[in-house]
Amino acid sequence: MDRWKGRVALVTGASVGIGAAIAKSLVQHGMKVVGCARNVKQIENLAAECVSSGFSGTLFPYKCDLTVEDEVLSMFSWIKVQHQGIDVCINNAGLALPEPLLSGKTSGWKTMMDVNVIGLSVCTREAYQSMKERKVDDGHIININSICGHRVINNADAHFYTASKYAVTALTEGLRQELREAKTHIRATGISPGLVETEFAYRFYSENQVKAEATYKSYKCLQAADIANAVVYVLSAPPYVQIGDIEITPVEQMM
Ligand SMILES: NC(=O)c1ccc[n+]([C@@H]2O[C@H](COP(=O)([O-])OP(=O)(O)OC[C@H]3O[C@@H](n4cnc5c(N)ncnc54)[C@H](OP(=O)(O)O)[C@@H]3O)[C@@H](O)[C@H]2O)c1
């Protein structure tokens, strides 16, 4: 990770869960990390924790709702002014809402698409443009996908979320192909976790917290730090190594 010291990463959805763990880990490895989410107070607390832990990097909290393109574009402008641009983009922010295909609300489907697919794509485009204008040829874009991006699990509540994550699989591979055509050495990687113990299920089942709690009790789940470790592994690979997609699941998870 030495070559990333002092360089700039954007981590979306850095307020809690996997994004917070990734942001913390990259700061620990000496990076300047812009962490964004709507609940910026939680990122400010994390930034203070990084300082008190004596980490060599810095976490810069930024309030941004990824469903509002103007906010995303303003964030990239702010990054350009404050830090010149970004070298690493971790598209982590995402959510599931229990909206089945036969009865779900259109508004819920739109929210999932806006964050999981459109927000991710806007950040990817802006990250690439930022790298291109500064002639950064070794940048990295990492999409936090899901095992749901690779198979359809028999759970009606998750089918639309699954469709949004299949889109992430296509976007990651499409991005890799466009980057090759553009003759850059910027890399694109997907990380596809199984069940990770975060706020995810509590938000998914916001009207049934007992069900949410049960989600994480049936077996030993992954922890957010396990996914952060995978990000560090991906960023540590030598510049000629392209890691396409990593699936990480709890040993006991049935699929
Ligand atoms: N947990 C799992 O089992 C699991 C498994 C596979 C894949 N994943 C994927 O991993 C990623 C992170 O999930 P997690 O488990 O860490 O979930 P989480 O604990 O619920 O955190 C989700 C993060 O996304 C952010 N976010 C949601 N909507 C946003 C918006 N409109 N604008 C900006 N940020 C937004 C949230 O921040 P604010 O609410 O503060 O805005 C939060 O930081 C997601 O892409 C998810 O699909 C999770």
Image: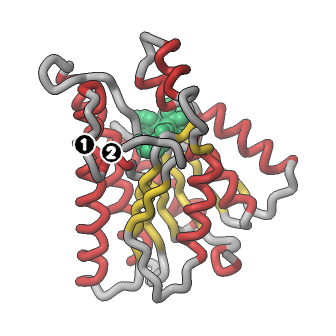
For label 1, the crowd category at 10 Å Cα-Cα, with few meaning under 14, some 14 to 19 and many 20 or more, is: some
Q: Quadrant of the C terminus?
A: top left
91 above or below 182?
Answer: above
| Res. 131 visible in picture | yes
Q: Residue at x 62, y 44 (%)?
A: 223
Q: Nearer the viewer, residue 250 or 13?
A: 250
Whole-angstrom CA distance, mark 2 to mark 1, is 6 Å
Q: Residue at x 49, y 26 (%)?
A: 215
Q: Is mark 1 within 8 Å of ligand 1?
A: no
For label 2, the crowd category at 10 Å Cα-Cα, with few meaning under 14, some 14 to 19 and many 20 or more, is: many
Callout 2 amino acid: Cys
Residue at the spot of label 2: 148
In the image, residue 18 lies at what x, y percent?
A: 56, 45
189 above or below 151?
Answer: below
Quadrant of the rendered structure where residue 174 is?
A: bottom left
In the image, residue 186 lies at what x, y percent?
A: 41, 78
Please tell me whether mark 1 sits on a helix, a strand or a loop: loop
Q: Residue at x 17, y 24 (%)?
A: 106
Position of 42 compared to 148: left or right?
A: right
Callout 1 amino acid: Val
The reply to whether callout 2 and callout 1 are in contact (CB within 8 Å) is yes
| Res. 65 visible in picture | no
Position of 181 compared to 138: left or right?
A: left
Residue at the spot of label 1: 152
Quadrant of the rendered structure where residue 156 is?
A: top left
Please tell me whether mark 2 sits on a helix, a strand or a loop: helix
